[in-house]
Amino acid sequence: MSQSAIEVRDLVKHYKILERDAGLKGAIKALFSRKYRIKEAVKGIDLSIAPGERVGYIGFNGAGKSTTIKMLAGVLRPDAGSVRIFGIDPHEDRIQNARQIGAVFGQRTQLFWDIPVRESFDLLREIYEVPRAEFEETVAWFIARLQLEPLLDVPVRQLSLGQKMRCELAAAFLHRPRVVYLDEPTIGLDIDIKETIRAFIREISDAWGTTVILTTHDMQDIEEVCDRVIVLDEGRIIYDDRIETLKQTFNNERTLEITLDEGTTFTIPPSVTGLVTELASETDTIQLAFNHHEISSGQLIREIVNCNRVKDLSVVVPKMETLIRNLYQPEVSA
Ligand SMILES: Nc1ncnc2c1ncn2[C@@H]1O[C@H](COP(=O)(O)OP(=O)(O)OP(=O)(O)O)[C@@H](O)[C@H]1O
C-alpha cells in the first residue's frame, strides 16, 4: 500500500487552565493556591489522508480543529497518540517537517511585515533553498493566478486583508510543499477574491498533487475545494466521508417553507405526522424537513393547505450547510 500523506492514531490534547475567582482578590488568591481545570480539546482522533486529497476539516467553534492542525503542523506536542506526515513526526523533526509543509494560519504571517512582498518571497526561497529556476517559474504562475503584480513592491503591512491573503497563499505554496494547512483562508473576503483563492488551491493541488487540509466555516469553500469532509464535534470525529457521499445521503431531503396568514397558528395534519420534522420556526414562518421519496412535495402541500391558512409556500433543496447541521442533529433527517 502506498504511504499516507497524514497518518494519525489516537491523538489526544488536553489544556491545563488556571482557575481563579473574579477580580483582584481572585488574582491574588490564585498566586498562592493554584487550581487547574483540564480541558480535553482533542479526545482520540484517527486519520488517514492520502497524498493529493483535499480535506475539509470542519466543526463548530471550540470543536478542536485548530488544536488538531497545530499538532499536525508540529506546533503543539500531543499528550497521547501519534502523528506522521509522510512518515515524519512533525513535533520531533520540526525542521525536516517544515520543508514538506506550508500553512496559512489566521492572524500569523509568514511574510515579513516591513519589506515588499517580492523580497519576502526571495527570503522564503533562501530559507527553503528552492532552486532559482523552479522559484521563478512558481512565482510567475502565482502572480498570474492570484493577480499579484501590483502588490509585489508594496510592504506587507500596507496590504488590505484580501491582498495579504493572496500573498500568504503564494508564500505557503512557494516551496512546493507536499502538505498545506489552510485555516479560514477566505474569511472576511469579497466573493470574487474567495473564488480566486478557491480556484488557486484546486489548480495547484491538482498540478502538484498537494495534500490540502482546509478548516473553514464557509461551506462554499468545502464544496468548491474539497473532495472529502471530516466533521469534528467536541474533540471527536463524528463524520468522515466523500463530499459526494454526504450529498447523496441527504439527496432526498427537502424543506417546505410555509408562511402563515398573520395571527394564525400552525397545525401539522395527522396524515403527515411521522413524515415531516419541524425545524426551527419563527412566528409566522414554519420550516418542515421531509424526504421527497416518502411523501411528494405536491401531496405534502395539499395536506398542509387543507389544515392551515397559508400565505406563501416554497420547497427548498437543502444547502451543504444544512446537510452538515443535520449531522449534528440526526433526528432532523430521520
Ligand atoms: N491555549 C489554550 N488554552 C486553553 N484552552 C484552549 C487553548 N486553545 C484552545 N483551547 C480550548 O480547546 C477547545 C478547542 O479549541 P480549538 O481552538 O482547537 O477549537 P476550533 O474548533 O479551532 O474552534 P474555532 O472554530 O473557534 O477556531 C476550546 O474549548 C478552546 O477553548
Image (cartoon, rainbow, N blue to C red):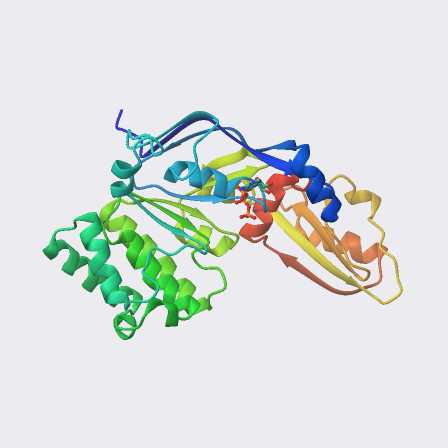
Q: Is residue 116 above or below residue 230?
A: below
Q: Is residue 163 above or below residue 83?
A: below
In the rendered image, the residue lying farthest to the left is 133
Tell me the quarter of the image containing the C terminus: top right
Q: Position of residue 37 (x, y in %)?
A: 65, 32
Q: Quadrant of residue 159?
A: bottom left
User: Residue 178: in sight, yes or no?
Assistant: no
Q: Is residue 293 above or below residue 282?
A: above
Q: Residue at x 48, y 60 (%)?
A: 187
Q: Residue at x 67, y 34 (%)?
A: 32
In the rendered image, the residue lying farthest to the bottom is 150
Total numbered badges shown on the rendered structure: 0
Q: Position of residue 233 (x, y in %)?
A: 58, 37
Side (left or right) of 270 relative to 72:
right
User: Residue 89: in sight, yes or no?
Assistant: yes
Side (left or right) of 17 relative to 136:
right
Q: Position of residue 295 (x, y in %)?
A: 68, 45
Q: Position of residue 12 (x, y in %)?
A: 50, 28
Side (left or right) of 232 relative to 257:
left
Viewer-nearest residue: 244 or 70: 70
Q: Quadrant of residue 244?
A: top left
Tell me the quarter of the image containing the N terminus: top left
Q: Quadrant of residue 38?
A: top right
Where's ligand 1: which quadrant? top right
Q: Residue at x 88, y 57 (%)?
A: 265
Q: Residue at x 42, y 63 (%)?
A: 194
